[in-house]
Amino acid sequence: MPASANLARVTPPADTRIEPPVDAGLAPVTSLPGVGPALAETLGKLGIERVQDLWFHLPLRYEDRTRITAIRDLVVGESAQVDGVVEAVETGFRYRPQLRVAIGDASRETLVLRFFHFRRQQAQQFAPGMRLRCFGAIRHGQHGLEMVHPQYRILRGEVAVDATLTPIYPVTEGLGQQRLRGVIEKSLVRLPDEALLELVPASLLAPLGLMSLRGALLEVHRPAPGADLDALLAGRHPAQQRLAFEELLAHHLSLKRLRARVRKQHAPALPGDPELEARFLDVLPFALTRAQRRVGEEVARDLGKRVPMLRLVQGDVGSGKTVVAALAALHAIANGHQTALMAPTELLAEQHLRNFRGWFDPLGLEVVWLAGKVTGRARDRALGRLAAGAPVAVGTHALMQEGVAFPRLALAIVDEQHRFGVQQRMALRDKGVAAPQAPRAHGRGRTNEGFLPGYVPHQLVLTATPIPRTLAMSAYADLDVSTLDELPPGRTPVRTVAVANTRRDEVIGRIRAACSEGRQVYWVCTLIEEGLRETSAAGRVGFGGGSRENTLVQAQAAEVAHAQLCAALPDLAVGLVHGRMKPAEKQAAMEAFQDGRTAVLVATTVIEVGVDVPNASLMVIENAERLGLAQLHQLRGRVGRGEAASTCVLLYQPPLSALARQRIETLRETSDGFVIAETDLRLRGPGELLGTRQTGQMAFRIADIVRDAALIPAVQRVGATMLRSHPALSRRLTDRWIGSAGRFAAA
Ligand code: ADP
Ligand code: MG
């Protein structure tokens, strides 16, 4: 046949044919017309280096400028486009300079546009009678509804609305939406045809009935006129679902590969020593709960093997995870190995230190303390003890620093893992890896000298954020999960009441009563300035800035509350702790409360995690309606730790929204962290649950584990086959979606 003969002539020799086709996506961004080194550098800040990074730089959301909303129909919290006539312009100064422009429309309502940053010229361009089109988020203002820093244009004549949704991308300083959109547009021209672009084998993909990757990318970047707007806005468009599937798959593969890589290595087998354990249980002032015994055994089984344990222990606040950690440490101790326990804050680490010393000192076991504030001679001494093989170290990030050496580390325990993230978890683990096997990302080979050659430590992760099963499967795909589903006996459940802010005086009366009985009280300030998220949020990239500002606002709120309480309770010592204080100040405030020298502690949500003061029996949470369920539950878990009946007062600003009412209702009805997590997930979404807003861990581009939970079984099925039969494709897929962040998982 002449056709095949022709083909044969142009087909390259067999040995070069197996080279994969040149992947247009791997070309650097500078290969695109108009992208020079300066722009490339700015793109780099968004993690965009290659052409495919632009393809997969997905819109965070869309703005709907396809319609005009009447002012009367505006909904607080949503973004909208409004046409109106300027009614009044006012520049003034309240706390800071501001420009206010009132506009009205045919619905005969008024909307205020408010600007805090503006040039005189800009203020002068507004004149009554002029028509404006503006777009922004709606919030409550002092005089009705307002938009803060809306986008706007002056209308002259009739101007049509947009025909399609406007994609909004994560941006960075020096690169606006417009410019980024242009660059992405150029990259899309290079999208190869479907066959080359797909990384998931067709045989696995076909049964899922998802749309093609190429079609999906084109649709999300430039929604066609006539596209299903509501589906796109909700993230449920088939194009978004296709991409969400792929992103979840990429994360899943990355975690599974990480797990496989660790499990291929060896850890020292750590069989238990019944005699040592019996002595420990003798020292404990209480008997273990059934759940603690069961989880202890699960951990013990893992530790008995030469395969590194990768286990998560999840349990509600107060379920007694620390003892489980201590039981695990005994295994290492019994075999002459070291254990490191790392907590995310000094506060928590110190608490563990107190517990561990209380339990281990009587057994003659040394517990070394290492935190950021341990410096100079004390630090040298601690390092010396660790180098000499001291059995247990408790501390913070300081444990992972260069120069900290554990010659016999066999067990790494990380508390409250959602504050750390996968990378840090691994950095501690790598402390036990012999230099040549340490992955490059953390490969401070030198500090690892003298470790057990070829061994990695067992890993135990403790988390107080119970999460529903589907979420756990995706968030912790690299870990086995044990659950402490029982609280120690003798706890009286915390009574939860909701009280309107207008009845503050009554609440202060309660505080006085509790303190007169020798009890202590937390007063938690949670002020979150409305609109902050909106103004700072170009999305995930903006979260950091937003939360910094939040810390400031919260700190100010706490200072105000502190002053008020000091005035209202002149006979009581009132302490203060917030995120803006120096670590030493925070520490001092916590210690004073722990020792009972202060009766009332005014705090921000810094106390959310892990603080244990059993004598505290009353907690007041301000602006409770603004917090998510999981967070309220965590906070509430700080009381009800002793014998006294405890109360949690949720102070709210009336009127309550339906959602807030539901949250408060749920809290009053149950103290089961798992029930609360499920409800929270339904009401609010996984971000808050996992604390990703703080850590940026699990920051998905498009997937949403709650919305897309239905995809997870398919992700796991396809993932298993891909790992087994298509390892190279798995790697490319992970690289495509997670890029440099995923490189830690590259074997
Ligand atoms: P969490 O799981 O929140 O980290 P902790 O380990 O801090 O909980 O334990 C909470 C409190 O309960 C501590 O004061 C601890 O000493 C106590 N505790 C732990 N286990 C038991 C038990 N089996 N019986 C009684 N008290 C316990
Ligand atoms: Mg704890």
Image: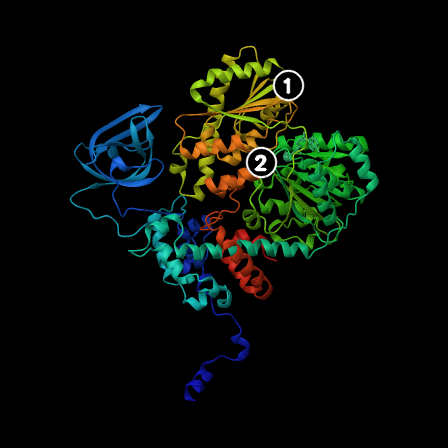
Give the residue drawn at x 58%, y 66%.
725
Q: Amino acid at mark 1?
A: Gly
Q: Is residue 266 left or right of residue 205?
A: right
- Quadrant of ligand 2: it is top right
The label shown at residue 596 is: 1
Give the residue drawn at x 41%, y 37%.
533
Give the residue drawn at x 47%, y 39%.
544
The label shown at residue 672 is: 2
Residue at the farthest right position? 275
Could you tell me which secondary element the residue under label 2 belongs to?
loop
Task: Name the spot of residue 722 as percent of width and height, x first.
Answer: 56, 63
How many residues crowd around disc 1 within 10 Å: few (fewer than 14), some, or many (20 or more)? some
Could you tell me which secondary element the residue under label 1 belongs to?
loop
Q: Amino acid at mark 2?
A: Asp
How many residues crowd around disc 2 within 10 Å: few (fewer than 14), some, or many (20 or more)? some
Residue 421 visible, this orientation: yes
Task: Name the spot of residue 406 as percent of width and height, x first.
Answer: 73, 43
Residue 375 visible, this orientation: no
Q: Is residue 86 left or right of residue 242?
A: left
Q: Is residue 359 left or right of residue 237?
A: right
How many numbered callouts? 2
Task: Name the spot of residue 84 as percent of width and height, x first.
Answer: 21, 37
Give the residue drawn at x 63%, y 25%.
613
Alpha carbon separation for disc pair 2 and 1: 29 Å
Q: Is residue 356 left or right of residue 79?
A: right
Name the image quarter holding the C terminus.
bottom right
**Which callout, 2 or 1, points at the residue further toward the start of the chain?**
1
Give above or below for 507 relative to 193.
above
581 or 392: nearer the eye?
392
667 or 65: nearer the eye?
667
| The residue at label 1 has a CB less than 8 Å from ligand 1 | no
Name the image quarter holding the N terminus.
bottom left
